[in-house]
Amino acid sequence: MTHVNPYYVNLKDSFLFYETKARAEAFEAAHPERRVLRLGIGDVTLPLAPVVIEALHKAVEEQARKETFQGYMPELGKDFMKRAAAANYARRGVQLEPEEIFVCYGIGDDLGAIGGLFARENRVAVVEPAYPAYVDTNLMAGREIIPIPGTEENGFLPLPFPGLEAELVYLCSPNNPTGAAYSKAQLQQWVDWANAHEAVLIFDAAYEGFITDPEVPHSIYELPGAKECAIELFSLSKSAGFTGTRLGYTVVPKALIREGKSLQAMWVRNRSTCTNGVSYILQRAGEAALTDEGLRQSRASLGVYRKNADLLTAALERCGIRYFGGQNAPYIWLRCPGGMDSWSFFDWLMEQAGVVGSPGVGFGACGEGWFRFSCFSTPEVTAEAAARLEAILPRLQGQTDP
């Protein structure tokens, strides 16, 4: 008789974004006359940079000719893509060897696979509110989860504390969903703690392209000692608009050793077994995105999303709504007005204003009473959503936080 994974009983019935999508679609079906504005899922709306499109076309043409055709890709990534990623780190003063960079189809895939490096008995601390997959992938593996609450009092940037006992710690900075970002000094505390406790940090750098504050590191490897304790996940989805193109990479430094074993060598073995490599066409696109010109062109799109954030935060300020984020990150994290719980506010906002966001409790228990807006929509939709918010939120103004 086949035995199923017993740890699935620890998962919620549905994934957060599956549930919000289902509720929004049901509302639209029941109200076809209403135009629903979606500020929930963080999907980009602007096209790829011209230099990336050019690289895609060129790579497709190469696949049409025998002399330039490419078959299976190296499981760990083509050298040209790994060198482009290493050069991008070098712009920040971080020196990495191409062998430490592993090309993947995006952070989501490697989030689910990176746990294969670690034993089930490792305790996993997750700085929450957090992207749900950090928790779910480890629950599926049967690991104990230790939530580290981010709160308004600590600016949603909790730090190591006496008595914290965990072997793995998940960090995301700038954070999804709160938009809060660790300073170099704050993140150094996590690095020092991890090295002192021989723990491993799993650092999600998906939103580094939105950072404007010079005190906020773009990579954990900007900090002394990080190569000895941290794995970094990087995605082009948000920084270069690759949500539908799918490309990223994971960095496992050679200096990261636990129990006498090189995690970099273990990840080589894992990827060689479990993947067949990323498409040549997509890797050429990624290489182009990481050139000086590609980064310059992508920054123009990021500027549009930053202006979206300005529109939304200005509306919230006029309504007297307490919020975090909107700077250094494409997300705005607001307190639900009127003392509502986050799912009640989701339903109320959709019914009253036709605006969809993400309930904070879906990112962890400490997210209850909070709500996330994404700034990735079009300027037109964002402007209309901001106007609708200003029209509807003052109804609850007497019950909102100052």
Image (cartoon, helix red, strand yellow):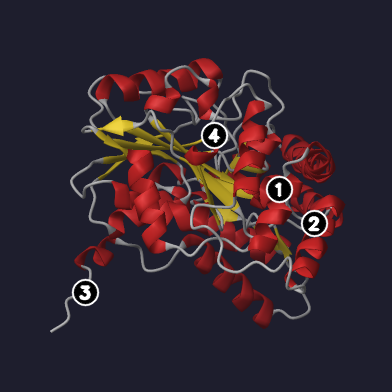
Instruction: Specify which label sits upstream in the sequence, 2 or 4.
Output: 2
Instruction: Specify which label sits upstream in the sequence, 2 or 1.
Output: 2
Quarter assignment of residue 2: bottom left
| Amino acid bearing label 2 | Ala
Query: What mark, if any, has residue 26 been given in the picture?
Result: none
Q: CB under 8 Å between callouts 2 and 1? A: yes
Closer mark to the observer between disc 1 and disc 4:
1
| Amino acid bearing label 4 | Ser
| Amino acid bearing label 3 | Val
What residue is pinned by disc 1? 287
Label 2 to label 1: alpha-carbon separation: 8 Å
Instruction: Specify which label sits upstream in the sequence, 1 or 4.
Output: 4
Instruction: Specify which label sits upstream in the sequence, 1 or 3.
Output: 3
Q: State whether residue 331 is above or below residue 28.
A: above
Label 2 to label 4: alpha-carbon separation: 30 Å
Label 1, residues with CA under 10 Å away: few <14, some 14-19, many ≥20 = some
